[in-house]
Amino acid sequence: SADLAVVHEWENIAITVPATLHTSVLGGDRVELIVPADHPAADRTSVSVAELPGERWITDTTGIYAAWLQQSLEAARVPYEMAGLVDEHESQISLTAHGLGLSLVPRLGRGPLPPGAVALPLDDHAPQRRLLLVERRDTVDRPALRAVRRALHWTAAQVLAHGLSAQAREAGAPQPVAAGRAGRGVCDGGNQP
């Protein structure tokens, strides 16, 4: 059995946690709009789907974002085309970078963007994932787990503030340590070799 785990839940679809477990919120993971770098909206600081009439969209087949996107486009009476149904975020981003359509990807659901793709925040109330730390109630007072909990909360705050982009790494933003390097600490300040 595990002493703690990081899980996510959708803001409108809460997970059920047994009474033997304790949860704390690490943060929220919002969806971002991915557009080609030469798209007219690429230089904007944010955008609403209602401002994107006639666009081609690449989305997943049955996900929360796909349902939200279609409902939002139809509610705004914006013409659109579903150009591709792709369940993997990196493929959606690659197709977008090549100008085949726009996509929605959770911020933590992607790595650095390839050349040709730009991420924008949405003005719309898009679905958000809550990142939760789930712990066994009978182990929360252990000193080692308190240290891990503090490190996870700190790292989550840094990653959510700076993202996982190449630009954040170049700016010295903390990055999570790769598996197998736990002996060096939870975070090395972005100075990984």
Image: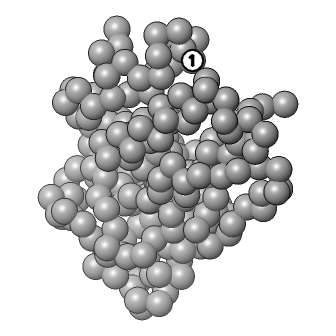
User: Residue 133 is drawn in which quadrant?
Assistant: top right
User: Residue 79 is drawn in which quadrant?
Assistant: bottom left
User: Residue 15 is drawn in which quadrant?
Assistant: bottom right
At label 1, counting other C-alpha atoms closer than 10 Å, the crowd grade (few under 14, some 14-19, many 20 or more) is few
Indicate how the structure is coloured in the image: one colour
For the point 29% across and 58% down, the residue is: 120
Q: Report the quarter where the C terminus lies.
A: top left
Q: Nearer the viewer, residue 147 or 79?
A: 147
**Quick one: which residue is furthest to the left in this view?**
43
> Does residue 3 appear left or right of residue 190 in this picture?
right
Image coordinates for residue 174, horizontal then vertical, percent? 33, 29
- Write down the residue under mark 1: 179
Residue 2 in sight in this render: yes
Q: Report the quarter where the N terminus lies.
A: top right
Amino acid on which the number 1 mark rests in the picture: Ala
**Is the residue 87 above or below the residue 67 in the image?**
above
